[in-house]
Image: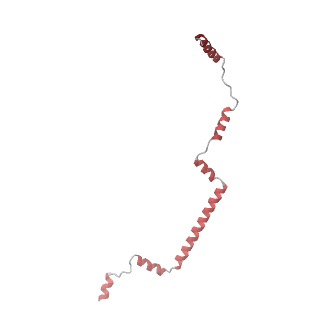
Amino acid sequence: MTPSHIQEKVEATLNSFDNLSQAAMRPFFYTRLMAKMEQQKVPAWWQIWLMSLTKPAFAVATLSVFVVLNITAITITLKDNQQSNNTSESATIQGFAQEYNLSVSTVYNDKRDRK
């Protein structure tokens, strides 16, 4: 290729830029593009977890577990209360006295006993 031939090709290429016009977009191109990008977006792990919480099956299962736990706790509490009511007051007082060593006689009682 000769330099004049190269020069002609360069000028032809530059002249082709003069006839260019701005590219035309179809209406609502940006909206359609954003919608397609949103469809391809992968949700984060916490979004997946939150979506699973809103499903009715998960909500019913969780609610039933809480109901069973509450019934169990109430039943155990009622049994403990019934057992504690069966003990007499004197046994409770004696247990308290033994716990704090209140059954030891005092010095004053010892002096009276010696006289």
Residue 54, x across and y down, in percent: 64, 52
- Quarter of the image with the N terminus in it: top right
Residue located 66% across and 35% down the image: 33
In this figure, what is the number of numbered marks?
Answer: 0
Q: Nearer the viewer, residue 71 or 9?
A: 9
Residue 12 position by quadrant: top right
Residue found at the far top of this picture: 4
User: In the image, is residue 100 above or below residue 67?
Assistant: below
Residue 18, x across and y down, in percent: 64, 16
Q: Is residue 25 left or right of residue 76?
A: right
Residue located 56% across and 74% down the image: 79
Residue found at the far bottom of this picture: 115
User: In the image, is residue 65 above or below residue 96?
Assistant: above
Residue 67 position by quadrant: bottom right
Q: Is residue 7 left or right of residue 98?
A: right
User: In the image, is residue 100 above or below residue 23?
Assistant: below
Residue found at the far right of this picture: 27
Coloring applied to the structure: secondary structure
Q: Nearer the viewer, residue 81 or 60?
A: 60
Q: Is residue 92 left or right of residue 113?
A: right
Residue located 58% across and 71% down the image: 75
Residue 8, x across and y down, in percent: 62, 12
